[in-house]
Amino acid sequence: MTGVTLYKTHLSADPPKNANPTISGSGITKPSTFIGSKVNLSGVNWKVNGQTVLLALSTTCHFCSESTPFYRQLLKERGSIHIIAVLPQTVDAARKYLEQHGVTVDDVRQAQLDSIDVQATPTLLLVNDAGVITSSWVGKLAADKEAEVLSKLRTPVGD
């Protein structure tokens, strides 16, 4: 069986030799070391934020734009969860993009997405108060995966 894998913005019939891919629920390849790894995003106080959702997006990603209705729903149902948007574009460009799509988050950060181990956009990372990724979702999510995200946000930490 022949397949094609998307790595960052490159299509490849074979994954890079250093990649350790697994398939996420959305069918997009991501490193298997994702869950349990610490997020390297300077200036974020994970302890104060508590449970946090990182929205790794790009202003040039059409799947990100198509997913904004879900992000608006996520914001309505998040409870006390902190939400940070991380984009490779400038903070001003990112804020404008989010504003145009009606997505109001707690914080907007500029970072190269590979610096937080994100290989594709959109990616949602659920991060605990120690800055460790506890769950992740990659790509434009189907309705069942959106429901899974919302369910995880409603589950108390430690359950």
Image: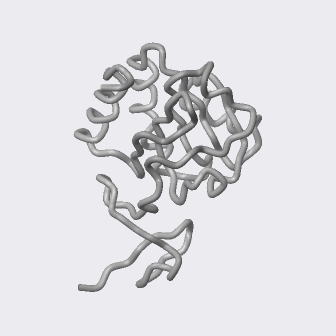
In the rendering, at what x and y percent does residue 12 appear?
A: 46, 81
Relative to 8, does residue 74 appear above or below in the rendering?
above
What colour scheme has been applied to the protein in the rendered image?
one colour
Instruction: Point out the image quarter for the N terminus.
Output: bottom left
What residue is at 38 percent from the left and 18 percent from the top?
77
Q: Is residue 56 left or right of residue 152?
A: right
Could you say which quadrant of the image residue 94 lies in? top right
What residue is at 57 percent from the left and 45 percent from the top?
38
Judged from this view, the residue extending furthest toward the top is 79
What residue is at 68 percent from the left and 41 percent from the top?
41
Could you say which quadrant of the image residue 48 lies in? top right
Could you say which quadrant of the image residue 152 lies in? top left
Q: Nearer the viewer, residue 35 or 153?
A: 35
Relative to 62, does residue 129 appear above or below in the rendering?
above
Relative to 151, does residue 80 appear above or below in the rendering?
above
In the rendering, at what x and y percent does residue 45 appear?
A: 67, 26
Relative to 121, does residue 3 appear above or below in the rendering?
below
In the rendering, at what x and y percent does residue 128 appear?
A: 50, 31
What residue is at 60 percent from the left and 23 percent from the top?
47
Q: Is residue 20 left or right of residue 98?
A: left
In the rendering, at what x and y percent does residue 17 appear?
A: 50, 82
* Count of labels in the image: 0
Instruction: Point out the image quarter for the C terminus.
Output: top left
Q: Nearer the viewer, residue 30 or 75?
A: 30
